[in-house]
Image: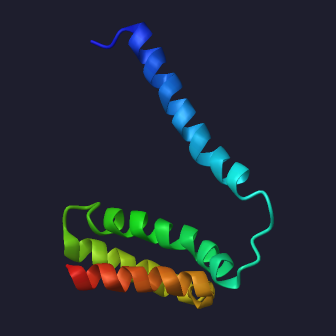
């Protein structure tokens, strides 16, 4: 059983780690990033990370891979009409999905 004291120790450690992860980039990169390659890389990183975290959970959420892929295809078809998949970040996420399915 976890005691109250241990709970608060773990809580403060997690809060400290979370704060460091968010505060260190602000301290390290004080000036504006002028390198175009670094700017474009940092622009697309959140989309790639989101895709890498989301697609495995989409594909394995039902326990049936065929049903999950059918649901994913249905969602993609419905989003095409809204023009969501035409944006560059969506194309990057689609590429991550393609690479992930190629691994399977």
Identify the image quadrant of residue 69: bottom left
In-front residue for pair 18/81: 18
Going by the image, does 24 lie left or right of 80? right
What x and y, as percent, mark residue 68?
29, 71
29 up-or-down from 33: above or below: above
104 up-or-down from 83: above or below: above
Q: Which quadrant, please, contains the C terminus?
A: bottom left
Going by the image, does 29 lie left or right of 5? right
Say how many tags the image has. 0
What x and y, as percent, mark residue 57?
34, 62
Q: Residue at x 32, y 66 (%)?
A: 56
33 up-or-down from 77: above or below: above
Identify the image quadrant of residue 55: bottom left
Q: Residue at x 80, y 63 (%)?
A: 31
Q: How is the image coloured?
A: rainbow
Q: Residue at x 58, y 81 (%)?
A: 89
What x and y, as percent, mark residue 20?
59, 41
What x and y, as percent, mark residue 25?
65, 54
13 up-or-down from 24: above or below: above
Identify the image quadrant of residue 15: top right
Going by the image, does 6 lie left or right of 15? left
Q: Which quadrant, please, contains the N terminus?
A: top left
Which residue extends farthest right? Answer: 31
Q: Residue at x 43, y 86 (%)?
A: 95
């Amino acid at each position: 059983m976890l005691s109250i004291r241990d709970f608060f120790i773990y809580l403060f450690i997690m809060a400290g780690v979370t704060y460091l992860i968010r505060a260190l980039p602000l301290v390290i990169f004080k000036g504006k990033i002028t390198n175009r390659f670094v700017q474009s890389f940092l622009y697309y990183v959140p989309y790639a990370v989101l895709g890498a975290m989301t697609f495995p959970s989409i594909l394995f959420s039902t326990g049936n891979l065929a049903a999950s892929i059918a649901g994913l295809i249905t969602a993609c078809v419905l989003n095409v009409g809204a023009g969501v998949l035409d944006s560059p970040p969506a194309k990057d996420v689609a590429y991550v999905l393609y690479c992930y399915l190629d691994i399977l």
